[in-house]
């Protein structure tokens, strides 16, 4: 019997399937945390190790601590004694989804705890979560759903399980009986339960039991199910009559219709022959559909998905939106606007989905184009080192620029004095020149810091990001990862540049002309001016 295919990605979680499995270390920590047969110190150490590792490991441990069940009080005690700060754990929504996969798929954990994680995964990711849970738990070990439904939880998971044609029919019937007795809203019968009652391979006694269970709980809701049993020629005659008797207690008119129908139903043998022929036709149609699924069609879908990822990459670093208002925000000295522009740059550079996007693109490219790609299995996104020339500006360089600009301003004034002479009041002229130089100096330094921010944004959207996407399109993924590392370095520099620019907007710069060498006659005037200040 085949199983549901495991989804490569889950909703709001871009972690590929191969990374949704815990490492040996995390597995050991989770198993020891739940093992009440070992000492508390070992369990506390395991919880603290998960807290230190954080992310998905802490998410998995956090779920275990909060999950309802016989282990709850004991694990809460371990949490209190550990002092690991589990009340406000730091992990993302995607980390929590992966943490649920860890718990559901770890074989050494109590079965009930894994079942709770599987149900939480279904509630979090719906049908994709159910497919993930089916791949993590034993294929033939889903009878626990019947007890869970009777206890009042995992009801939606049971609905999805009933609709899973790959599951064992006997288990589906067992879970269906529990679901049939569950207190649903008045008049509501789950569609999955209706399909199970009508299932051609289900024993007729089980079909009757499912309908009868609903009849005991909600008689009016069971009319459709009882009619389904009574009108199906594949159901044994005795079971059909039993369904009619139950229907007679609820709706005598419908019951009489079913009695009349019995005389027109084909015999059991004829009904089975019809069912067999219908099944053969279905198999032939399925084979025909499979034949229509040609390699060319598969290749087309694969190429379409690859192109979608490329389009997503292009859009992430597009000049059409990424910090496109930075120039105006700098010109208007808009601190909040500049901060948002830098935050957008950092968000693109440090987005976890970005690394997953490159990983997925590399895998799909390998599937589509084979070994003609520049694959480097040992080079991960974290190992890559940026080698692009990122524009940089330090505070020391800015101070040196301020000195150079100050000296240039005063030397230009010196040439004007030598060419045109002094004003009537030399000391007043020096005061005016000092004011003008310092004003120009502050403006020039602020301009330089702003230009550095502009240069970073321009370098990202016009040089670095296009180089990254070009390398990816050429299937040179080691180069693409190096460019990605450079993007992260640029984001770090953008944060420093923003802080430096803010400082220049509020700081008044000045330059002391007495630090420069002057001709003797000028020097004497400067000394007189300095003494008079």
Image (cartoon, helix red, strand yellow):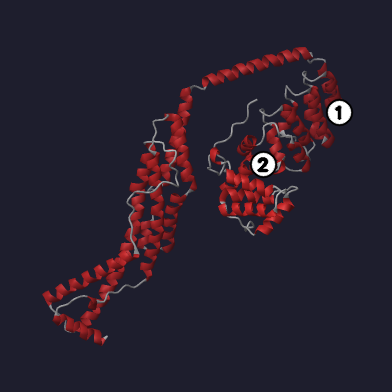
Quarter holding residue 454: bottom left
* Mark carried by residue 108: 2
Q: Is residue 173 visible?
A: yes
Q: Secondary structure at mark 2?
A: loop
Callout 2: few (<14), some (14-19), or many (20+) C-alpha neighbours within 10 Å? some
Tell me, yes or no, whether the two marked residues, 1 and 2, touch with CB atoms within 8 Å.
no
Tell me if 19 is positioned left or right of 141 in this view: left
**Front one among 3 and 237:** 3
Q: Residue at x 36, y 40 (%)?
A: 470
Tell me if 520 is positioned left or right of 178 in this view: left
Q: Residue at x 63, y 40 (%)?
A: 105
Q: Position of residue 391 (x, y in %)?
A: 32, 55
**Front one among 30 and 116:** 30
Q: How many marks?
A: 2
Q: Position of residue 335 (x, y in %)?
A: 42, 63
Identity of the residue furthest to the left in this view: 419
Quarter holding residue 260: top right
User: What distance separates the C-alpha of mark 1 from that of mark 2?
Assistant: 47 Å
Identity of the residue furthest to the bottom in this view: 532
Callout 1: few (<14), some (14-19), or many (20+) C-alpha neighbours within 10 Å? many
Tell me if 439 is positioned left or right of 308 in this view: left
Image quarter (top left, top right, bottom left or bottom right) of the N terminus: top right
Tell me if 186 is positioned left or right of 116 in this view: right
Q: Position of residue 257 (x, y in %)?
A: 82, 22
Q: Residue at x 63, y 15 (%)?
A: 281
Q: Is residue 158 above or below residue 410?
A: above
Q: Position of residue 184 (x, y in %)?
A: 76, 40
Q: Is residue 278 above or below residue 31?
A: above
Q: Is residue 266 visible?
A: no
**Front one among 79 and 463:** 79
Mark before the other along the chain sequence, 1 or 2: 2
Please give the residue where the numbered disc 1 appears in the rendered image. Answer: 246
């Amino acid at each position: 019997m085949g199983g549901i295919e495991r989804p490569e990605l889950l909703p709001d979680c871009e972690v590929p399937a191969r990374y949704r499995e815990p490492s040996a270390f995390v597995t050991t920590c989770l198993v020891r945390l739940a093992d009440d047969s070992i000492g508390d110190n070992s369990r506390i150490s395991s919880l603290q190790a998960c807290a230190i590792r954080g992310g998905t490991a802490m998410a998995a441990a956090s779920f275990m601590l909060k999950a309802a069940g016989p282990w709850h009080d004991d694990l809460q005690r371990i949490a209190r004694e550990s002092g690991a700060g589990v009340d406000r754990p730091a992990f993302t929504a995607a980390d929590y989804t992966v943490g649920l996969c860890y718990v559901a798929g770890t074989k050494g954990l109590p079965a009930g705890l894994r079942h709770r994680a599987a149900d939480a995964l279904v509630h979090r990711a719906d049908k994709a979560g159910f497919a993930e849970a089916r791949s993590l738990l034993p294929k033939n070990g889903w009878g626990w759903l019947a007890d869970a439904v009777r206890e009042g939880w995992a009801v939606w998971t049971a609905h999805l399980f009933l609709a899973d044609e790959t599951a064992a029919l006997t288990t589906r019937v067992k879970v269906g009986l529990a679901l049939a007795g569950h207190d649903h809203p008045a008049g509501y019968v789950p569609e999955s339960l209706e399909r199970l009652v009508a299932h051609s391979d289900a024993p007729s006694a089980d079909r009757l039991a499912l309908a009868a269970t609903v009849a005991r709980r909600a008689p009016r809701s069971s009319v459709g199910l009882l009619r389904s049993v009574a009108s199906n020629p594949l159901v044994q005659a005795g079971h059909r009559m039993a369904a009619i008797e139950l229907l007679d207690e609820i709706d005598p008119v419908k019951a009489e219709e079913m009695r009349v129908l019995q005389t027109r139903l084909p015999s059991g043998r004829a009904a089975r022959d019809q069912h067999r022929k219908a099944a053969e036709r279905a198999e032939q149609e399925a084979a025909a559909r499979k034949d229509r699924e040609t390699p060319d069609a598969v290749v087309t879908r694969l190429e379409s998905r690859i192109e979608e990822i490329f389009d997503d990459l292009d859009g992430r670093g597009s000049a059409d939106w990424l910090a496109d208002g930075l120039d105006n925000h700098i010109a208007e000295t808009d601190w909040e606007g500049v901060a948002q522009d830098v935050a957008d740059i950092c968000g693109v550079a440090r987005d976890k989905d970005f690394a997953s996007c490159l990983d997925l693109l590399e895998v799909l490219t390998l599937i589509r184009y084979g070994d003609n790609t520049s694959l480097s299995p040992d080079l991960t996104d974290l190992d890559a080192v940026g080698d692009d020339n990122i524009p940089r500006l330090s505070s020391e360089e800015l101070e040196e620029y301020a000195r150079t600009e100050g000296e240039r301003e005063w030397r230009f004034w010196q040439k004007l004095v030598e060419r045109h002479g002094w004003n009537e009041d030399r000391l007043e002229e020096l005061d005016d020149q000092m004011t003008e130089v310092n004003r120009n100096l502050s403006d020039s330094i602020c301009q330089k810091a702003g230009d550095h921010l502009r240069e970073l944004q321009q370098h990202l959207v016009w040089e670095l990001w296009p180089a990254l996407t070009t390398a990816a399109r050429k299937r040179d993924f080691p180069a693409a990862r190096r460019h990605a590392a450079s993007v992260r370095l640029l984001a770090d520099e953008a944060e420093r540049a923003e802080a430096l620019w803010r400082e220049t907007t509020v700081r008044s710069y000045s330059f002391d002309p007495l630090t420069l060498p002057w001709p003797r006659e000028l020097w004497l005037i400067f000394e007189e001016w300095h003494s008079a200040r």
